[in-house]
Structures are given as structure tokens and as C-alpha cells.
């Protein structure tokens, strides 16, 4: 990971950089998740409201992507109660990477405020699905 602690500039550009970083780091295109447009809208609103730096923006995007993914799992489980959730151990690397990007952010206080509802919702969905980050 490179040091990209660049102050807020434009949420659209920061989204593109965050998605490219995600693909570089995890090897798949973030745009493949069906809720990506909703995630992008939330991302843009939060980045603009809190004027997040690029490091914070990347952390936020990773957290939003993870929430989007487990929300899809929740939907599948609601549709079919026999739906089996696979091993998500490797997928938790996204949260670890989000934490790493956050730790390099100079505007960590803004990121904490922006991300708190996302963190809370993620925890609620994980509890509902009996998932734990080990």
C-alpha cells in the first residue's frame, strides 16, 4: 500500500482511486456487487460531508463494500433459510485493510464520525447472521 494521505478533493475521483486500490489489493472489481451504486452514493455523501482525505476515503469504501456484501448474504439467508454461509475468513481481510488505511489517515476523527453508522450496521448484520471476525 502506498501512502496516499491526500486531503479531500473530489468524491468522484476518490471513489475511482478507492475502487482501483480495492481491485489491486483484492483482485476483483468492486463494481461486480449489485449494490455498488447505493454504496457509491453513500460514499460520495459521506466523503463530501466530512471532507475525507484519500486514505480515509479508501477505508470508508472498503467498509461500505464489506457491509454491502454481508447485506447480500443476509438477503440470501432471508430468501432461503437453508442457505449456507461459506467461510468468510479471507473476506475479513477487507476489514483489516480498512483498519490499515484508517490508521494512516490524518483526519481519523472525521472518518470515525462518518463511519460510525456503517460500523454499527455491520455489527448488527453480523450478529443477525451469527458471524464473528476472528
Image (spheres, rainbow, N blue to C red):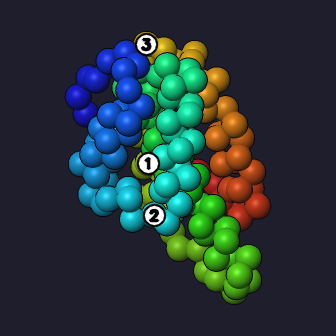
Numbered circle sitting on residue 33:
2
- Choose top left, top right, bottom left or bottom right for residue 46: top right
Q: Classify mark 1: helix, strand or loop.
A: helix
Q: Can you identify the residue that label 1 sits on?
A: 94
| Percent of width and height locating residue 83 | 64, 83
* Coordinates of residue 100 in the picture (x, y in percent): 41, 31
Residue drawn at the location 44% of the way across and 48% of the way down: 94
Nearer-the-camera pick, 99 or 121? 121
Q: Earlier in the sequence, mark 1 or mark 2?
A: 2
Which mark lies nearer to you, 1 or 2?
2
Question: Callout 2 environment at 10 Å: few (<14), some (14 to 19), or many (20+)?
Answer: few
Label 1: how many Cα within 10 Å (few below 14, some 14–19, many 20+): some
- Residue ID at (67%, 71%): 75
Disc marking residue 106: 3
Residue sitting nearer the eye, 94 or 64? 64
Looking at the rendered image, the quarter that the N terminus falls into is top left
Q: Earlier in the sequence, mark 2 or mark 3?
A: 2
Measuring 59% from the left and 61% from the top, which residue is drawn there? 70
Amino acid at each position: 500500500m502506498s501512502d496516499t494521505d491526500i486531503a479531500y478533493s473530489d468524491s468522484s475521483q476518490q471513489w475511482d482511486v478507492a475502487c482501483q486500490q480495492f481491485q489491486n489489493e483484492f483482485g476483483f472489481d468492486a463494481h461486480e456487487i449489485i449494490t455498488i451504486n447505493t454504496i457509491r452514493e453513500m460514499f460520495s455523501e459521506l466523503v463530501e460531508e466530512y471532507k475525507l482525505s484519500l486514505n480515509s476515503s479508501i477505508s470508508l469504501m472498503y467498509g461500505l463494500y464489506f457491509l454491502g456484501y454481508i447485506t447480500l448474504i443476509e438477503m440470501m439467508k432471508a430468501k432461503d433459510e437453508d442457505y449456507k454461509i461459506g467461510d468468510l475468513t479471507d473476506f475479513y481481510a477487507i476489514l483489516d485493510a480498512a483498519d490499515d488505511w484508517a490508521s494512516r489517515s490524518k483526519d481519523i476523527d472525521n472518518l470515525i464520525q462518518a463511519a460510525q453508522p456503517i460500523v454499527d450496521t455491520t455489527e448488527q448484520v453480523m450478529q443477525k447472521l451469527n458471524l464473528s471476525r476472528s
